[in-house]
Structure formats: structure tokens, C-alpha cells
């Protein structure tokens, strides 16, 4: 989400919506403001419900910069535009990490955990099951 703001493709009043194909007719989605504050928590949403989600009051009148999915796939009804490249680049991931580091944010790398926004499709069998 940092790239469109850093490259001047998104205005400071815009929000960036990152939407990636999650298969099963769903999207992984999250949205951020220009300070990279989360305005839509990372989630998974049915493609058919994306337009309804983005019609919530907090999004009304807000211009969205879309990264990830082609805008046509989202069926949006309000002001939105696409920033290229569509997917994150190593440069911007490193830039965000460096900015956080220089601001004194130094989380313990060994305590990092993945963020799962959907339950797994497969789970191990419990001992004795089957």
C-alpha cells in the first residue's frame, strides 16, 4: 500500500485497497490510509460481497486506489483507480521496513507469526481419529 502514496499515484486523502485472489471466489483484502494506518483489517471476502463491503459509510466519498486485483473484478460503484504495478515490490517492502526501523520499531523477528485471515482448508488428523 505504500507504493502508490510514495510514487505520487495516490493523493494523501485517498485510501489504498489491496485485494488479492484468494481462490474459491474470494479475495484477501485490506485497506490503508496515507499514513499506512489500517482502515480495513485484513480479511477474506466473497467477490460478490466486495462492492457491499466498500459501500459502508467509512468508504463513502473516499477515492480508492486499487492494488492487486483488476478493478473490473471488484464490481465497484464508486471512485476508484488502479495503481501499477499491481503487486507489492521488494523495494517498497524494504522501504516500509526501513522507515519502521528508523522510527525505533524493532520487533523481535523470532516472535513474528503469519497472519491467517481464513481457516485452513486441510487440517491434520487428531491422534486416534480415523
Image (cartoon, rainbow, N blue to C red):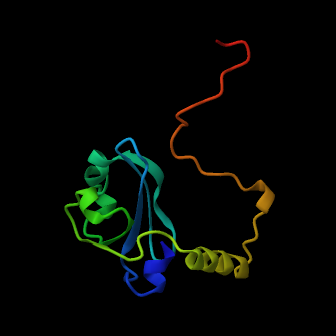
Q: Residue 130's image quarter?
A: top right
Residue nearest the observer in this picture, 78 or 9: 9
Q: Could you tell me which residue is drawn at 38 percent across and 41 percent down?
A: 24
Q: Residue 62's image quarter?
A: bottom left
Q: Position of residue 28 (x, y in %)?
A: 44, 52
Q: Is residue 9 above or below residue 59?
A: below
Q: Position of residue 5 (x, y in %)?
A: 45, 81
Q: Is residue 85 above or below residue 17?
A: below
In this view, the residue farthest toward the left is 77
Residue nearest the observer in this picture, 36 or 83: 83
Q: How many marks?
A: 0
Q: Is residue 119 above or below residue 65?
A: above
Q: Residue 98's image quarter?
A: bottom right
Q: Could you tell me which residue is drawn at 45 percent across and 86 percent down?
A: 7
Q: Is residue 59 left or right of residue 7?
A: left
Q: Position of residue 102 (x, y in %)?
A: 71, 82
Q: Could you tell me which residue is drawn at 25 percent across and 69 percent down?
A: 61
Q: Is residue 71 above or below residue 111?
A: below
Amino acid at each position: 500500500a505504500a507504493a502508490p502514496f510514495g510514487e505520487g499515484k495516490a493523493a494523501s486523502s485517498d485510501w489504498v485497497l489491496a485485494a488479492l485472489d484468494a481462490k474459491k471466489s474470494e479475495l484477501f483484502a485490506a485497506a490503508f490510509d496515507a499514513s499506512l494506518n489500517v482502515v480495513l483489517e485484513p480479511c477474506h471476502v466473497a467477490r460478490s460481497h466486495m462492492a457491499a463491503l466498500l459501500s459502508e459509510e467509512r468508504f463513502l466519498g473516499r477515492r480508492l486506489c486499487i492494488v492487486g486485483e483488476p478493478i473490473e473484478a471488484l464490481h465497484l460503484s464508486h471512485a476508484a483507480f488502479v495503481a501499477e504495478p499491481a503487486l507489492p515490490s521488494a523495494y517498497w517492502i524494504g522501504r516500509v521496513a526501513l522507515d519502521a526501523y528508523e522510527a525505533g520499531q524493532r520487533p523481535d523477528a523470532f516472535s513474528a507469526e503469519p497472519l491467517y485471515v481464513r481457516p485452513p482448508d486441510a487440517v491434520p488428523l487428531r491422534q486416534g481419529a480415523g
